[in-house]
């Protein structure tokens, strides 16, 4: 192998550790070792259009990259070349950041090496020197054997079907492909013609009739699957000429004048017995129509709301109008709203795997009417309970609160990042009940409730419980239930990685707040349940 030539071992070897676009050479000679399982060698000479030699295939895993541009490889002019791995062009692997600059006149006499880890797929490499057009591709497979097996490609069709299997009104075609060796490069399809086009997402077909689809996939080694054929029949839905029925209801406290006090909540509903409701729209106080997605909270003033509904056949109801007057409660102060993110943080301050968003607001006068949040520009939605966010990446959260007098807080903002997680298993939580019981296993006197949880991966972060439907409270130590009646305790635990167990529950009855009599017994002093 050329990399162990005498000049390298004697005085000129250098290990190039490359990050970004800079080259750092170790001053002392370092002979190339067998740290990696494979050595991939590129050489360059006086040619500016192609490398003198380059590997075509490799095996996934650790590798030593050797790049030599020296007199021994045919460079007689002292020309500088680079070996650069492409990290931006679509269709290639981008996980190796390599940029080696070599010249027969440098301190290593043009011979450099770097340690990398390759993954299955296709890499593009090139020379970054101006005027040089040298480039090529390196195919990396899982086993090291050439990839000669084409991908597996499948097609699914979604939509409403009639008894004959025809799709009514519309059909949605979804294609998917897998390749266990070099990976999928492209998925293509034709629709009622012979022209293949790239598949980028589900295809919606609405034209009535029989549609012929051919589809195929090609992997990164160039293997193309045999085309498959699918026939999709789309028929027109039964003719629907009847518009939907739409209604509005208003909820809220009324004052002596019959007006709503502080705020009013308007809920719109629609029904259609034929093609079904497609959308509900409304306009507030003469504004433009917007699509209804959740109840509208109205603040102080007289409001005119006009609303309508459209079915899937395109029939739109006649607009209806509703006038609502909301009187102030004397509250002119906006609520105070807070956001809390709960989850395991890695060393970079990112949440590992997921984060749980908890929003809270306080208003000492009229009270809270709603809390809303907007995650990553998707639009404000009403907050009801903690939201678990798992998408890897940086997220931007906006949030606000409105009180019953119609005062809305200033929009607050929070940015956070979710990284890939290692621990995905929730904790195991147990409940233990202790106290004297009678012959019917009911508790005679106080019941001591003990909760415990274990998590072998990231560890338990907190235990929470709810007694008789109240809000969940953080558990710190055993507590006593002594009120006569039937009680239900719901409980759950969350680990340091943010995984929360399923909510468990236990129900028991306390028949007396005092201790047992002589006729009563204590046959079951403890009850334990695990979730």
Image: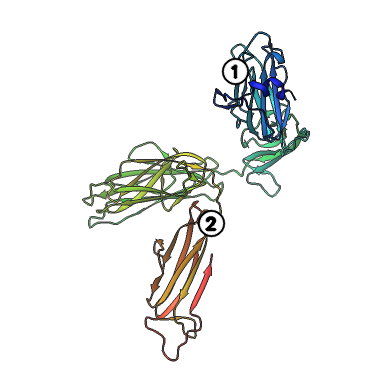
Is residue 323 visible in this depiction of the protein? Answer: no
Quarter-of-image position of residue 14: top right
Q: Quadrant of residue 146?
A: top right
**Front one among 248 and 452:** 452
Whether residue 370 appears in this view of the structure is yes
Mark 1 surroundings: few (<14), some (14-19) or many (≥20) residues within 10 A: some
Q: Position of residue 85 (x, y in %)?
A: 62, 25
Looking at the image, residue 530 sits to the left or right of residue 156; the answer is: left
Residue at the front extreme of this rendering:
10
Residue 430 pos. (x, y %):
51, 67
Location of the N terminus by quadrant is top right
Question: Residue 58 appears at what percent x and percent y?
Answer: 72, 31
Residue 411 placement, left or right of 14: left
Q: Are the residues tagged 1 and 2 within 8 Å (C-beta)?
A: no
Q: Residue furthest top?
A: 77
The residue pinned by badge 1 equals 107
Q: Nearer the viewer, residue 292 or 163?
A: 292
Q: Position of residue 343 (x, y in %)?
A: 46, 50
Residue 474 to residue 443: above or below: above
Task: Compute the Cα span from label 1 to label 2.
Answer: 55 Å
Q: Which residue is mark 2?
A: 426
């Amino acid at each position: 192998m050329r990399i162990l030539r005498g000049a390298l071992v004697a005085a000129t070897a250098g290990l190039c550790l490359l990050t970004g676009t800079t080259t750092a050479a170790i001053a002392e000679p370092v002979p190339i070792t067998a740290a990696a399982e494979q050595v991939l060698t590129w050489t360059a000479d006086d040619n500016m259009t192609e490398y003198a030699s380059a590997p075509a295939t490799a095996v996934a895993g650790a590798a030593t990259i050797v790049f030599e541009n020296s007199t021994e490889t045919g460079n007689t002019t002292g020309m500088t070349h680079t070996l650069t791995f492409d990290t931006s062009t679509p269709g290639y692997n981008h996980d190796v950041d390599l940029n080696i600059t070599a010249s027969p006149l440098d301190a290593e006499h043009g011979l450099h090496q770097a340690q990398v880890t390759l993954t299955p797929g296709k890499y593009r490499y090139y020379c970054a020197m101006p005027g040089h057009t040298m480039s090529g591709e390196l195919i990396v497979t899982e086993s090291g054997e050439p990839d000669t097996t084409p991908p597996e490609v499948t097609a699914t069709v979604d939509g409403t079907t009639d008894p004959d299997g025809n799709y009514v009104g519309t059909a949605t075609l979804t294609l998917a492909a897998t390749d266990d060796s070099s990976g999928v490069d492209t998925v293509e399809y034709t629709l009622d013609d012979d022209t293949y086009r790239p598949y980028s997402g589900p295809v919606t077909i609405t034209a009535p009739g029989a549609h012929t689809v051919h589809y195929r996939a090609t992997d990164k080694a160039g293997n193309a699957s045999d085309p498959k054929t699918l026939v999709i029949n789309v028929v027109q839905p039964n003719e629907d000429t009847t518009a939907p029925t739409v209604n509005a209801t208003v909820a809220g406290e009324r004052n002596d004048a019959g007006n709503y006090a502080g705020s009013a909540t308007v809920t719109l509903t629609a029904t259609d017995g034929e093609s079904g409701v497609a959308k509900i729209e409304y306009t507030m106080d003469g504004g433009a129509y917007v699509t209804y997605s959740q109840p509208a909270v109205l603040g102080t003033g007289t409001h005119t709301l006009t609303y309508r509904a459209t079915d899937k056949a395109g029939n739109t109801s006649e607009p209806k109008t509703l006038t609502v007057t909301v009187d102030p409660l004397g509250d002119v102060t906006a609520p105070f709203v807070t956001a809390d993110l709960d989850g395991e943080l890695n060393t970079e301050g990112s949440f590992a795997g997921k984060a749980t968003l908890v929003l809270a607001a306080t208003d000492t006068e009229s009270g809270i009417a709603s809390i809303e949040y907007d995650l990553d520009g998707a639009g404000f939605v009403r907050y009801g309970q903690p939201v678990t966010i798992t998408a890897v990446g940086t997220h931007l959260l906006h949030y606000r609160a409105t009180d019953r007098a119609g005062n809305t807080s200033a929009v607050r903002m929070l940015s956070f990042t979710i990284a890939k997680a290692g621990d995905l298993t929730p904790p195991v939580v147990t409940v233990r009940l202790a106290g004297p019981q009678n012959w019917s296993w009911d508790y005679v006197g106080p019941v001591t409730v003990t909760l415990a949880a274990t998590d072998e991966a990231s560890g338990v972060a907190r235990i929470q419980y709810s007694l008789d439907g109240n809000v969940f409270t953080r558990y710190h130590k055993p507590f006593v239930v002594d009120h006569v009646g039937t009680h239900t305790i719901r409980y759950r635990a969350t680990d340091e990685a943010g995984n929360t167990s399923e909510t468990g529950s236990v129900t028991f009855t306390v028949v007396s707040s005092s201790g047992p009599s002589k006729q009563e017994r204590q046959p079951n002093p403890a009850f334990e349940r695990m979730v």
